[in-house]
Amino acid sequence: MPVDPSLASLLEFLASAGNPPMSQQTPAQARAGFRALTVDLRDPAALPAVASVEDVEVPGGAGPRPARIYRPDAVGPLPTIVMFHGGGFVIGDLDTHDLTARTLANGAEAVVVSVDYRLAPEDPWPAGVEDAVAATRWAVSALETLGGDSRLAVAGDSAGGNLAAVTAQTMRDEGVELAGQLLIYPVTDGGTSYPSHTENAAGYFLEVETMVWFDQQYVGHLSDVDRTDPRLAPLHGSLSGLAPAVVVVAEFDPLRDDGLAYAAALASAGVPVEVRTFPGLVHGFVDMGRHSPAAQAAVDETFGLFRKVLRD
């Protein structure tokens, strides 16, 4: 099917702005542009209400990291979800993913801990991985004061989906049993070229040139990158015994086939997995519900699926 008409209008608006491609910007410019799109152009009054929002610090790989705890208006005890934002490991922060965290807390009926991990190129790989794992280890010890029961899960979109998948593997290796992992159009395999990289290379919000630019910031400091290192490409890790997963992708996304490959590999390893490919949608649709009813329906379905996983 064609791109959702509401999202097509949004893509046309972004193209008409005349801004240079992200791949031609500095990281600071890219961050400012992304924040303008996700924070400055939205109506704060339209954000979904939650019972409480608390700014805290959590352990990171090289010291404390900012985090934000979202509590839904739901009767506890509740699951706890550690969430990692997207942005190619270069852009994004707690504010750019405030809407996602609020919607996830309400949709999954869970306490959400959104983690502001270190970004490249100032702090390249594996800094973000180290922060994600450290924050999740902290959550294991803090469950009583977070959701209040033993259910702990991880979630993330795009680059954050990569960090969630890597963290899920690490937690399993450390003997921690997670209740679930929510992977939204995740980066899973940096060394393979998939059809979606060509089919959706340009014009659908995330472009392949931008993906290459993100990769340069994230691992460009390494003279010899092992693209099969599971902490970089979780598809190449051991997948048996992992937490049940929800993996969702968009039809018009260069990362579509990365996510589908990981979902298939999880299923082959015996991991329970719910997978959805949402037709007509593009990368970033989780933050586009205010522009597109189809995107909002996909968000509602995704978070509803994860709520069910956490309660099975």
Image: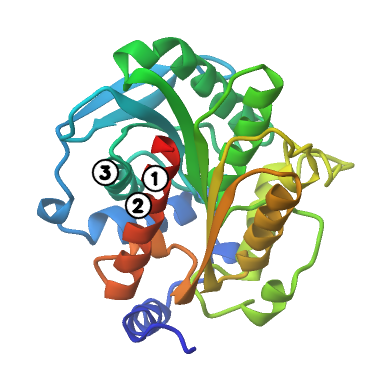
Three-letter residue code for mark 1: Lys
Q: CA distance from mark 2 to mark 3?
A: 14 Å
Q: Is residue 166 visible?
A: yes
The residue that mark 2 highlights is 304
Q: Residue furthest bottom?
A: 2
Q: Check contact, mark 2 vs mark 3: CB within 8 A.
A: no
Residue sitting nearer the eye, 269 or 103: 269
Disc count in the image? 3
- Residue at (46%, 55%) from the top-left corner? 29
* Distance Cα–Cα, label 1 vs label 3: 18 Å
Q: Which mark is residue 102?
A: 3
Residue reaching furthest left? 45
Work out whether residue 115 can be spotted: no
Q: What residue is pinned by disc 1?
A: 308
Marks 2/1 in contact by CB < 8 Å: the verdict is: yes
Residue 58 or 13: which is nearer the viewer? 58
Please identify, in this view, whether the residue under mark 2 or under mark 1 is nearer the observer. Answer: 1
Measuring from the top left, give residue 26's x and y in whole percent.
55, 54
Compared across the picture, whether 117 is left or right of 24 comes to: left
